Protein backbone atom coordinates (compact mmCIF):
# COMPACT_ATOMS: atom_id res chain seq x y z
CA UNK A 1 0.00 0.00 0.00
CA UNK A 2 1.53 3.32 -1.08
CA UNK A 3 0.60 6.74 0.24
CA UNK A 4 1.63 10.21 -0.88
CA UNK A 5 3.80 12.28 1.39
CA UNK A 6 0.93 14.69 2.02
CA UNK A 7 -1.32 12.00 3.54
CA UNK A 8 -2.14 12.71 6.63
CA UNK A 9 1.04 4.62 30.74
CA UNK A 10 4.49 4.62 28.97
CA UNK A 11 5.75 1.36 27.54
CA UNK A 12 7.97 -0.66 29.84
CA UNK A 13 11.74 -0.80 29.67
CA UNK A 14 11.42 -3.95 27.56
CA UNK A 15 11.33 -1.62 24.56
CA UNK A 16 15.03 -1.23 23.92
CA UNK A 17 16.84 0.68 21.18
CA UNK A 18 17.34 -1.07 17.88
CA UNK A 19 20.85 -1.99 16.76
CA UNK A 20 20.89 0.06 13.56
CA UNK A 21 24.52 -0.40 12.54
CA UNK A 22 24.31 -4.18 12.21
CA UNK A 23 20.90 -4.01 10.52
CA UNK A 24 22.07 -1.37 8.05
CA UNK A 25 24.74 -3.81 6.89
CA UNK A 26 22.01 -6.41 6.31
CA UNK A 27 19.85 -4.07 4.21
CA UNK A 28 19.04 -5.12 0.67
CA UNK A 29 21.00 -3.34 -2.10
CA UNK A 30 17.57 -2.47 -3.52
CA UNK A 31 16.74 -0.65 -0.28
CA UNK A 32 20.03 1.23 -0.44
CA UNK A 33 19.26 2.28 -4.01
CA UNK A 34 15.76 3.49 -3.10
CA UNK A 35 17.13 5.50 -0.18
CA UNK A 36 19.37 7.54 -2.49
CA UNK A 37 16.36 9.17 -4.13
CA UNK A 38 14.42 9.45 -0.87
CA UNK A 39 17.29 11.23 0.88
CA UNK A 40 17.61 13.56 -2.12
CA UNK A 41 13.97 14.49 -1.52
CA UNK A 42 14.73 15.84 1.95
CA UNK A 43 14.45 12.77 4.17
CA UNK A 44 17.02 11.64 6.71
CA UNK A 45 17.55 8.07 7.88
CA UNK A 46 16.45 7.47 11.47
CA UNK A 47 17.16 3.75 11.75
CA UNK A 48 16.98 0.34 10.14
CA UNK A 49 15.00 -2.64 11.41
CA UNK A 50 12.78 -5.53 10.45
CA UNK A 51 9.83 -3.36 11.39
CA UNK A 52 7.11 -5.67 10.06
CA UNK A 53 8.97 -8.85 11.13
CA UNK A 54 8.94 -10.36 7.64
CA UNK A 55 12.63 -11.27 7.70
CA UNK A 56 13.76 -8.28 5.61
CA UNK A 57 15.22 -4.99 6.81
CA UNK A 58 13.23 -1.77 6.28
CA UNK A 59 14.22 1.85 6.92
CA UNK A 60 12.61 4.50 9.09
CA UNK A 61 13.07 8.01 7.66
CA UNK A 62 12.05 11.47 8.85
CA UNK A 63 11.48 14.95 7.39
CA UNK A 64 12.51 17.73 9.75
CA UNK A 65 11.20 20.36 7.32
CA UNK A 66 7.61 19.04 7.41
CA UNK A 67 6.33 19.52 10.95
CA UNK A 68 3.07 20.38 12.68
CA UNK A 69 1.44 20.32 16.09
CA UNK A 70 1.86 16.54 16.32
CA UNK A 71 5.54 16.55 15.36
CA UNK A 72 7.39 15.99 12.09
CA UNK A 73 6.63 13.67 9.22
CA UNK A 74 8.20 10.22 9.29
CA UNK A 75 7.87 7.32 6.91
CA UNK A 76 8.73 3.67 6.39
CA UNK A 77 10.65 2.48 3.36
CA UNK A 78 9.45 -1.03 2.56
CA UNK A 79 8.47 -3.03 -0.50
CA UNK A 80 5.37 -1.68 -2.20
CA UNK A 81 2.64 -3.61 -4.01
CA UNK A 82 4.95 -4.03 -7.03
CA UNK A 83 7.76 -5.40 -4.89
CA UNK A 84 9.98 -2.32 -5.15
CA UNK A 85 11.31 -0.40 -2.16
CA UNK A 86 9.51 2.91 -1.64
CA UNK A 87 8.05 5.06 1.11
CA UNK A 88 4.85 3.13 1.78
CA UNK A 89 3.35 4.90 4.79
CA UNK A 90 3.63 8.28 6.52
CA UNK A 91 2.63 9.67 9.91
CA UNK A 92 3.45 12.66 12.10
CA UNK A 93 5.21 12.25 15.43
CA UNK A 94 7.90 13.65 17.71
CA UNK A 95 11.48 12.31 17.54
CA UNK A 96 10.76 8.92 15.89
CA UNK A 97 12.99 6.03 16.91
CA UNK A 98 12.93 2.26 16.61
CA UNK A 99 12.65 0.28 19.84
CA UNK A 100 11.87 -3.29 20.86
CA UNK A 101 14.50 -4.76 18.58
CA UNK A 102 13.47 -2.52 15.71
CA UNK A 103 9.83 -3.70 15.56
CA UNK A 104 8.13 -0.73 17.26
CA UNK A 105 8.29 2.98 16.37
CA UNK A 106 8.46 5.28 19.41
CA UNK A 107 7.46 8.90 18.74
CA UNK A 108 8.08 10.41 22.19
CA UNK A 109 5.82 7.95 23.98
CA UNK A 110 3.36 7.37 21.14
CA UNK A 111 4.04 3.86 19.84
CA UNK A 112 3.30 2.44 16.39
CA UNK A 113 3.62 -0.95 14.74
CA UNK A 114 3.84 -1.71 11.01
CA UNK A 115 2.57 -5.04 9.65
CA UNK A 116 3.49 -4.42 6.02
CA UNK A 117 0.06 -3.04 5.17
CA UNK A 118 -0.99 -0.61 7.91
CA UNK A 119 0.56 1.51 10.64
CA UNK A 120 -1.29 1.09 13.95
CA UNK A 121 -1.03 2.72 17.40
CA UNK A 122 0.36 0.27 19.93
CA UNK A 123 0.42 -0.31 23.69
CA UNK A 124 -1.53 2.72 24.86
CA UNK A 125 -3.36 3.15 28.17
CA UNK A 126 -6.97 3.25 26.98
CA UNK A 127 -7.60 -0.40 27.88
CA UNK A 128 -6.56 0.31 31.49
CA UNK A 129 -9.27 2.96 32.03
CA UNK A 130 -12.30 2.24 34.20
CA UNK A 131 -15.37 3.96 32.78
CA UNK A 132 -18.44 5.07 34.72
CA UNK A 133 -21.69 6.81 33.67
CA UNK A 134 -21.87 10.59 33.50
CA UNK A 135 -24.12 12.81 35.58
CA UNK A 136 -26.68 15.48 34.81
CA UNK A 137 -23.96 18.12 35.26
CA UNK A 138 -21.77 16.35 32.71
CA UNK A 139 -24.70 16.21 30.29
CA UNK A 140 -25.28 19.94 30.71
CA UNK A 141 -21.64 20.72 29.79
CA UNK A 142 -21.83 18.58 26.65
CA UNK A 143 -25.18 19.97 25.55
CA UNK A 144 -23.81 23.50 26.02
CA UNK A 145 -21.10 22.73 23.48
CA UNK A 146 -23.22 20.47 21.26
CA UNK A 147 -26.78 21.81 21.56
CA UNK A 148 -28.14 19.28 19.07
CA UNK A 149 -27.52 16.51 21.65
CA UNK A 150 -30.73 17.38 23.52
CA UNK A 151 -31.77 13.73 23.90
CA UNK A 152 -28.46 12.72 25.47
CA UNK A 153 -28.97 10.20 28.27
CA UNK A 154 -26.73 10.22 31.36
CA UNK A 155 -25.86 6.54 31.04
CA UNK A 156 -24.68 7.07 27.45
CA UNK A 157 -21.95 9.38 28.78
CA UNK A 158 -18.96 7.15 29.52
CA UNK A 159 -16.27 8.75 31.67
CA UNK A 160 -12.87 7.79 33.07
CA UNK A 161 -10.48 9.66 35.35
CA UNK A 162 -6.91 9.96 34.10
CA UNK A 163 -4.06 12.36 34.83
CA UNK A 164 -3.25 13.34 31.26
CA UNK A 165 -1.26 16.47 32.08
CA UNK A 166 0.91 14.98 34.83
CA UNK A 167 -0.14 17.55 37.43
CA UNK A 168 -1.64 15.05 39.93
CA UNK A 169 -5.09 16.46 39.15
CA UNK A 170 -6.94 13.92 36.99
CA UNK A 171 -8.79 15.03 33.91
CA UNK A 172 -11.90 13.19 32.76
CA UNK A 173 -11.95 11.45 29.41
CA UNK A 174 -15.52 11.33 28.10
CA UNK A 175 -17.09 9.62 25.12
CA UNK A 176 -20.68 9.19 23.99
CA UNK A 177 -21.84 5.59 23.73
CA UNK A 178 -24.58 4.86 21.22
CA UNK A 179 -25.06 4.95 17.44
CA UNK A 180 -27.39 7.95 17.61
CA UNK A 181 -24.53 10.17 18.78
CA UNK A 182 -22.14 9.33 15.98
CA UNK A 183 -20.97 11.86 13.43
CA UNK A 184 -20.93 9.62 10.39
CA UNK A 185 -19.12 6.55 11.71
CA UNK A 186 -17.23 8.45 14.40
CA UNK A 187 -18.13 8.78 18.09
CA UNK A 188 -17.57 12.14 19.85
CA UNK A 189 -15.13 12.42 22.75
CA UNK A 190 -14.19 15.19 25.20
CA UNK A 191 -11.50 15.85 27.79
CA UNK A 192 -12.81 17.71 30.85
CA UNK A 193 -10.62 19.49 33.40
CA UNK A 194 -11.35 18.86 37.08
CA UNK A 195 -13.49 22.02 37.15
CA UNK A 196 -15.58 21.03 34.13
CA UNK A 197 -13.81 22.97 31.38
CA UNK A 198 -13.55 21.16 28.04
CA UNK A 199 -9.83 20.98 27.27
CA UNK A 200 -10.17 19.05 24.03
CA UNK A 201 -12.78 17.38 21.88
CA UNK A 202 -12.88 15.31 18.73
CA UNK A 203 -14.20 12.07 17.33
CA UNK A 204 -12.91 8.58 16.70
CA UNK A 205 -13.78 5.38 14.86
CA UNK A 206 -13.44 2.14 16.85
CA UNK A 207 -11.68 3.66 19.86
CA UNK A 208 -9.21 6.41 20.77
CA UNK A 209 -5.58 5.74 21.70
CA UNK A 210 -4.11 7.58 24.68
CA UNK A 211 -0.39 7.93 25.45
CA UNK A 212 1.68 9.85 27.99
CA UNK A 213 4.56 11.81 26.46
CA UNK A 214 8.07 10.70 27.37
CA UNK A 215 9.93 13.99 27.62
CA UNK A 216 7.44 16.27 29.38
CA UNK A 217 4.12 16.38 31.20
CA UNK A 218 1.36 15.88 28.70
CA UNK A 219 -0.46 13.33 26.61
CA UNK A 220 -1.24 12.43 23.02
CA UNK A 221 -4.71 11.44 21.83
CA UNK A 222 -4.63 9.45 18.60
CA UNK A 223 -7.89 8.91 16.74
CA UNK A 224 -8.84 7.33 13.44
CA UNK A 225 -11.21 9.38 11.33
CA UNK A 226 -11.60 7.35 8.16
CA UNK A 227 -8.78 8.84 6.11
CA UNK A 228 -6.04 8.09 8.61
CA UNK A 229 -4.84 8.66 12.16
CA UNK A 230 -4.62 12.14 13.67
CA UNK A 231 -2.68 13.01 16.81
CA UNK A 232 -3.67 15.74 19.30
CA UNK A 233 -1.10 16.82 21.90
CA UNK A 234 -2.39 18.00 25.30
CA UNK A 235 -0.02 19.82 27.65
Image: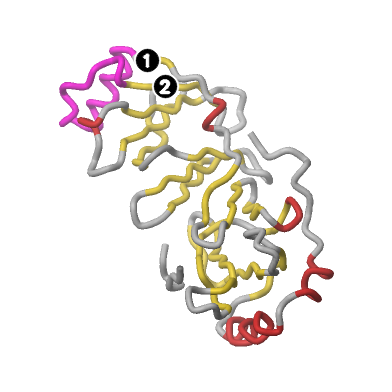
User: How busy is the neighbourhood of tag 1: few (under 14 within 10 Å), some, or many (20 plus)?
Assistant: some
Q: Mark 1 highlights which residue?
A: 133
The spot of residue 212 in percent (x, y) is 60, 39
Do tag 1 and tag 2 residues touch (Cβ < 8 Å)?
Answer: yes
* Image point (45%, 19%), residue name: 131
* Image point (64%, 50%), residue name: 108
From this viewpoint, is residue 134 visible?
Answer: yes
From this viewpoint, is residue 96 visible?
Answer: no
Image quadrant where residue 28 sits:
bottom right
Read off the magenta span: 135-156
Farthest residue, direction top? 136
Residue 174 vs 48, above or below: the answer is: above
The spot of residue 2 in percent (x, y) is 45, 71
User: Closer to the camera, 202 or 171?
Assistant: 202
Residue 114 vs 124, above or below: the answer is: below
Q: Mark 2 highlights which residue?
A: 159
* Image point (55%, 83%), residue name: 41
Q: Is residue 145 magenta?
A: yes
Amino acid sequence: MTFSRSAGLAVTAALTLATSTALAQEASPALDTALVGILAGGASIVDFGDIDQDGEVEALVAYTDDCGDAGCLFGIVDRDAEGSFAEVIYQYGETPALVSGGTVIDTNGVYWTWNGASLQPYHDIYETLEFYPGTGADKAIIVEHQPWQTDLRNYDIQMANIDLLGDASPERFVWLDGPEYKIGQASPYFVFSDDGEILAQGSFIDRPYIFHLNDRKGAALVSYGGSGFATMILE
